[in-house]
Amino acid sequence: PRSPHPWVYFEGQVVAAAEALVPVTTQAFNYGTAVFEGIRAYVAGCGGLNVFRLDDHLKRLENSARLLQLENLPRRAEMKAIILDLLRRNEATTDSYVRPLAYKKALLPGVGFGVKLTGVSNGLVINTLPMGAYMPAGGIRCAISSWRRIPDVSLPARAKITGSYANSALAMESAQRNGFDDALMLNVHGNLAESTTSNVFVVKDGCLITPPLSAHILEGITRDAVMTLAREELGLQVIERDISFSELFSVDECFLAGTGVEIVPVTQIDHYVLQESGVGEISAAIKSLYLQTVKGLNSKYAHWLSPVSD
Ligand code: PMP
């Protein structure tokens, strides 16, 4: 096993991972009031490490932070420098994962006990770890969860708030206990939203279809990359529209798209087998194109990569 990265950015300094500790009274720990990002860095085909779509992840983090009034985030350029420097400090030479987390910390002096956003200090921690592909190459089986995705009017899915992940954990737990690998989640309207930690695409008659942003989903960066690559490189028609529960049983292919899972074909939805013969053709083509792109083998998309070495 690869040794973990020893250094963590914590509250303005780089410290040993064991020293990045928060008190039990931390607001975010008690109430789920933190926002975060999951970012990947890949070893380039020609050597060196590149962070994939760092600017887009940081922009989303800024928007999530604004919602929870986490005002103290360093500016974009500084955040980028902190992350790239941390990867260098950790001597990351293999595919890695970067997790910035901005959180509500402690009640300011004189502020009364309670659940709130103002009158609370803010913290920022960034940790990195070695992480390669972790999903099976042969695809996965997905349950359709009884747990619905949290509606936008309750807790916006477009913001990456830690508290929302209790909803994902409930869906994942139930799916795995029932023998599946992950769950597809419907929204309160009964249409497909997303998976527990990724967006969803289906293929029908050669077209790529994915739920619209109004379907109570996270505006995934991998989702955006897939739509771009499918249109530009494969010449596919990509449609953002609602996908009903029943339509899920008549699609030709399905795959999940997210930073962590990367592109993972779904070979079975509930007990309906999509691919008797393995992974679908379009899913396989998208996956291969995506992996080439993140590894810097697709020079047209070099602007999506931030080199770690200076
Ligand atoms: N939806 C959810 C609920 C997620 O947690 C993630 C992972 N961040 C995604 C979608 C995919 O987003 P991205 O491609 O930006 O990682």
Image (cartoon, helix red, strand yellow):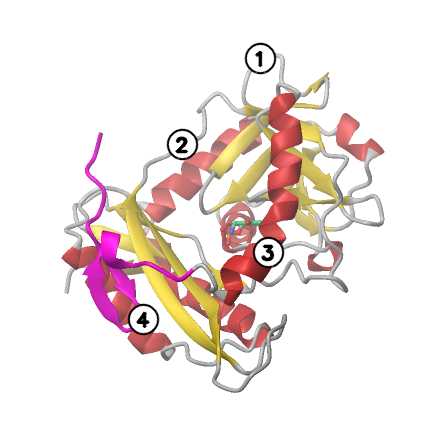
Residue 121 drawn above or below residue 191: below
Residue at screen point 78% across, 43% down: 243
The disc, 2 or 4, on the residue closer to the chain's N-terminal end is 4
Foreground mark, 1 or 3? 3
Q: Is residue 16 magenta?
A: yes
Secondary structure under tag 1 reads loop
Foreground mark, 1 or 4? 4
Secondary structure under tag 2 reads loop
Q: Which residue is mark 1?
A: 277
The disc, 3 or 2, on the residue closer to the chain's N-terminal end is 2
- As drawn, the label of residue 134 is 2
Residue at screen point 55% across, 59% down: 30
**Rounded to the nearest whole Å, what is the CA distance between mark 1 and mark 4?**
51 Å
Which three-letter amino acid code belongs to the residue tagged 1? Ser
Badge 3: few (under 14), some or many (20 or more) residues near its Cα, within 10 Å? some
Q: Which residue is mark 3?
A: 163
Q: Nearer the viewer, residue 204 or 25?
A: 25
- Note whether residue 287 is visible: yes
Residue 249 placement, left or right of 175: right
Q: Which residue is mark 4?
A: 11
- Note whether residue 253 is visible: no
Residue 278 drawn above or below residue 299: above
- As drawn, the label of residue 267 is none
The disc, 3 or 4, on the residue closer to the chain's N-terminal end is 4
**Rounded to the nearest whole Å, what is the CA distance between mark 3 and mark 4?**
21 Å
**Rounded to the nearest whole Å, what is the CA distance between mark 1 and mark 3?**
39 Å
Q: Which residues are magenta?
A: 1-23
Contact? badges 1 and 4 (CB < 8 Å)? no
Which three-letter amino acid code belongs to the residue tagged 3? Gly
Secondary structure under tag 3 reads helix
**Rounded to the nearest whole Å, what is the CA distance between mark 3 and mark 2?**
24 Å
